[in-house]
Amino acid sequence: MAFTKLISTCIPLPIDNIDTDQIIPARFLKATSREGFGDNLFRDWRYLPGDVPNPDFVLNQDRYSGQVLVAGKNFGCGSSREHAAWALVDYGFKVVVSSEFADIFYNNALNNGLLPVVVEAGVLERLFEQIEKEPGTQVTVDLPNQTLDVPSMGLSVRFEINPYKKDCLINGLDDLDYIRSRSEAVSAYEAQLPAWR
Amino acid sequence: MEASHPKTLFDKIWDQHVVERREGYPDLLYIDRHFIHEVTSPQAFDGLRKRGIRVHAPHRTTATADHNVPTLNQHLPIKEKLSRLQVEALEKNCKEFGIDLYGLGHQRQGIVHVIGPELGLTRPGMTIVCGDSHTSTHGAFGTIAFGIGTSQVEQVLATQCLLQYKPKTMRIEVNGQLGKGVVAKDVVLYIISQISAAGGTGYFVEYAGSAIQSLSMEGRMTVCNMSIEMGARGGMIAPDETTFQYIKGRPHAPQGEDWEAALAYWKSLPTDEGASYDKVLRFDADDIQPMVTYGTNPGMGVRISDPVPASAPNMGPADMEKAFNYMGIRPGESLLGKKIDYVFIGSCTNSRIEDLRMVAEFVKGRKKAPDVNVWIVPGSKQVEEQAKAEGLDKIFEEAGFELRQPGCSACLAMNEDKVPAGKYCVSTSNRNFEGRQGPGSRTFLASPLTAAAAAVTGRIEDVRQLMN
């Protein structure tokens, strides 16, 4: 699940406040494994009643493809369901670009090797315009250098990510590996806890 | 120096729980209490099995089945296969890893955020997590409580710790006295309508001010519950006598000397004079009326007497239009008199005994409107039993309301309690997202009182006009 650099076209979803119920509706959360959620990614936008693909939805439009989802602000708000991140990854996304992410989703994405890239609102706006104009627009996401480049726009922006999480993504490590390596500190902390806590 | 430095409630609890702080890493935070349910835990247990590790502190995790359970005939096997398998997986996992389970059929079963406080498992000064965004509910007791993903559920099971960056802090004050017919739900819907569904992103909120302090524990839980709906990691309220009285005598409350020691700690928690926050917002209780949402996120709320606005904080025109189209509502129209089809009274926001009492007091001697389906889903077996002991079930029955069995139910419509496509539901739950209550369903979030008024009139009404 390690991530370093990705060159890909993008799929635009210029809608703000996309909640995790839209990313994966609750009725599809009944599985006990992490796989297969991509089939129901954006289910109720992607399909019309009767499971007919909705031609107006971007995932059903041939002109858009790629491993980068570009979405409106406050992406991933609402329910904490990690299934939302699993569904995006299972569908094939490796990066989500937005001007703002909901906190829980942001963490869930990072914990699944899905890179959330935060850009300024103005940059996001320009990116949407560019992708609409030229659906084949390629972007380069470089994690070690923390840059998002769109050569056809002459755009190069730096994005922030905390250094620990960056290191985890690049090396394919997870929090649990690290926390387990700190077990002595945890034992020492627990030893001083009063019984009523 | 450190001792005299004024600290917030949040900072006191956070600092108290830092196991280790290392340069270049997030804080390693100890978690006192972990709640789990059937939907977001199975993959975490699988992870433990794959790594061949056991649960580090089983007594600090408590399980219940709530999201997926039917609210009728709970004594029978769950009909829907996938739901049944998920509930069975929870039972199996709890048994294998030695975790207390308040499962289906248990006399203490219920919605995870309702039973935690009921059992006395939620206490001031704790860190509390659960694979559910409404874990913020527990903040009502003066705790740092927040929702986590399944990977983090696995981390807590394995280590009782999480790696966390400290969020910014925001103080939200509501001062003054709430008017007739204005309750906790209206307070939080009002706040979110003012700051938007993303107004709290990156922050942990402390609610304060006289209007907040005057709330019961149930009311405080309603407010903290919806912190996530403004994007905040969580929300909290300083513990006080109301808090202590609620906890005292509950099954897991400390006793004797432990109670005294705990109480002394709890009393030290409220924010010190002069402590600073990253952001402070102040609201006046006089500005708050019964609230109702008109759109597809909880920030799209309006005072019942105001027309539906054409714009809302942090919302672009295209997103407003998308929401209006979905809801079948136009800006400028009044929601008063809007015909509705369903009323759902329940969820971790508003399914506690006080909510049911509020509804019963209003509907006593009235009947539901003929074309409306009314579901009352208690938050727990305890709430259900208490309601029956007080005769509330009789009042509901006479009014034509259906008192069901505990679970998350139509809040997220994972079980069969779904609002049909295109139908309108006045709901005491927390989310009005597209399809949240069933594909194509249209939700108006409101207080239990406003929901009760809708149930008896079949319309959205100003409950204040109907109160005796």
Image: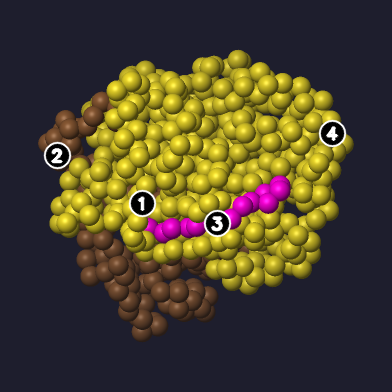
Read off the residue under disc 1.
B271
Q: Which residue lies furthest to the left in this view?
A: A184
From the image, state whether disc 4 or disc 1 is nearer to you: 1
State the SS at label 3. Answer: strand
In the picture, the disc for residue A185 is: 2
Q: Which of marks 3 and 4 precedes in the sequence?
A: 3
- The image shows residue B216 at horizontal and vertical percentages of 55, 39
Does the magenta-highlighted stretch encompass residue B170?
Answer: yes
Farthest residue toward the bottom?
A154
Residue B297 shown left or right of residue B18 in the figure: right
Rendered shade, chain B:
yellow
Q: Distance between the residues labelled 3 and 1?
A: 17 Å
CA gap between label 2 and label 1 equals 28 Å
Q: Which chain carries label 4?
A: B
Contact between labelled residues 4 and 2, with CB atoms less than 8 Å apart: no
In screen coordinates, is B457 left or right of B182? right
